Amino acid sequence: MRIKGIVLAGGKSKRFGTDKAFFVYQGAPLLERAVSLLDSLRLSPCVMTRRGGSYPFLLCPVMEDKLPDKGPLGGVYTAMEAFPGNSLLVLSCDMPALTAEALSFLLSEHREQNSVTLFSAGPEEFQPFPGIYAPAVFPLAAKHLREDKLSMQDLLKGLPDKQLVLWRGDPRIFLNVNQMKDLEA
């Protein structure tokens, strides 16, 4: 099965104060860092954003999220609709400590029969991003959107065949930046 790389960059960044995707951290915009990770794994990255359009510093397609006010679930759904039949390795643009090593490990643990492969700290403690989402997730995602249930955690809890992978490396890879002070951690 083919796996496509997706970067979610459609958040409003209210708490951050400026668009996180374009915030320069350690010499590169957060969005560019995320795209580079997927590119290094040869996953043909695509960016999902509120605005669509052209981002000259990115050498990958940028798509407009069809459901921009539905949070990350809307972005995942839009990507699944755009790339039917593909599993998606989805990450958010605001995870500056995420590494190619961690993503490679997640990919190596993925099994086609699973609807989703996620990092976990325990049976019901999992991270929605980064995660590998199979086409089997699409119907449940559509149902949750119709019912305006936008929580990624609730969606994932409803999937019976999750592959949960224990990450023994640096836990900071899961840090997502919501405020400027998060970058100081």
Image (cartoon, rainbow, N blue to C red):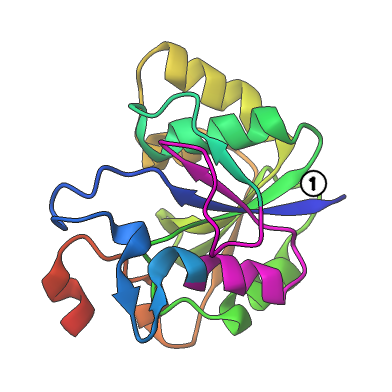
Magenta run includes residue 180? no
Q: How many C-alpha atoms fall within 10 Å of the one at disc 1: few (<14), some, or many (≥20)?
A: few
- Helix, strand or loop status at disc 1: loop
Position of 124 with respect to 39 (left or right) is left
Most foreground residue, 42 or 163? 42
Looking at the image, residue 98 lies above or below residue 148: below
Instruction: Check disc 1 and give the amino acid type.
Output: Gln
Q: Is residue 161 visible?
A: yes
Magenta run includes residue 46? yes
Most foreground residue, 47 or 54? 54
Position of 58 with respect to 31 (left or right) is right
Most foreground residue, 23 or 115? 23
- Residue reaching furthest to the right: 1
Q: Position of residue 184 (x, y in %)?
A: 17, 83
Q: Residue at x 57, y 24 (%)?
A: 140
Which residues make up the magenta segment? 33-60
Q: Is residue 185 visible?
A: no
Which quarter of the figure has residue 117?
bottom right
Looking at the image, residue 146 lies above or below residue 50: above
Q: Position of residue 141 (x, y in %)?
A: 53, 26
- Residue reaching furthest to the top: 146
- The residue tagged 1 is 113
Q: Residue at x 26, y 65 (%)?
A: 177
Q: Residue at x 64, y 67 (%)?
A: 38
Q: Position of residue 105 (x, y in %)?
A: 66, 77
Q: Position of residue 95 (x, y in %)?
A: 39, 68
